[in-house]
Image: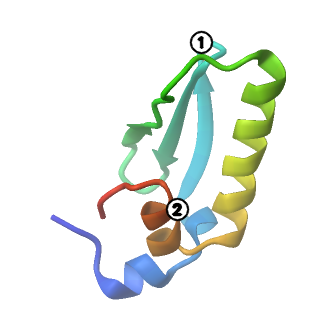
Amino acid sequence: MGLSESELAQPASSRFRIEIIGGDAVFLADRRLGHKIYLGLERSLTRPEFRRYVASLQDDVKKLSIGELFAKYNLSG
């Protein structure tokens, strides 16, 4: 079941947060459903690259709507 247009238009920060597990596994955690979406990487990152990647994700969660976030990271809603 996908998200409605009104849900996709909501700020991503109202529903999602970035969660790091084990130091290098990044998830988009859905606060409402308790689900986690793994955001896999195409290659291994150095620690500084990883920190920048996570900071960028957190910034996107703060600035984008759910629909924009899903489109940017090629997720389906």
Nearer the observer, disc 2 or disc 1?
Answer: 1
Q: Is residue 49 left or right of residue 37?
A: right
Q: Is residue 26 above or below residue 25?
A: below
Who comes first in sequence, dot 2 or dot 1? 2
> Are the residues at dot 2 and dot 1 in contact (C-beta closer than 8 Å)?
no
Q: Quadrant of residue 34?
A: top left
Q: Is residue 5 above or below residue 8?
A: below
Q: Spatial distance from mark 2 to mark 1, Cα to Cα?
A: 23 Å
Disc assigned to residue 2: none
Q: Is residue 14 above or below residue 27?
A: below
Query: Residue farthest to the top?
Result: 22
> What is the three-letter code of the residue carrying label 2?
Arg
Q: Is residue 49 left or right of residue 76?
A: right
Give the residue number, with chain letter if any, for mark 1: 22
Q: Quadrant of residue 2?
A: bottom left
In the rendered view of the protein, which quadrant contains the C terminus? bottom left
- Residue at image point 74% right, 49% down: 56
Q: Secondary structure at mark 2?
A: loop
Q: Position of residue 68 (x, y in %)?
A: 51, 72
Give the residue number, with chain letter if any, for mark 2: 15
Q: Position of residue 6 (x, y in %)?
A: 39, 87
Q: Position of residue 33 (x, y in %)?
A: 36, 51
Query: Residue farthest to the right?
Result: 48
Q: Is residue 59 left or right of residue 71?
A: right
Q: Give 35 or 58, whichever is nearer the viewer.
A: 58
- Residue at image point 54% right, 21% down: 43
Q: Residues within 10 Å of mark 1 (few under 14, many from 20)?
A: few
- Residue at image point 49% right, 44% down: 29
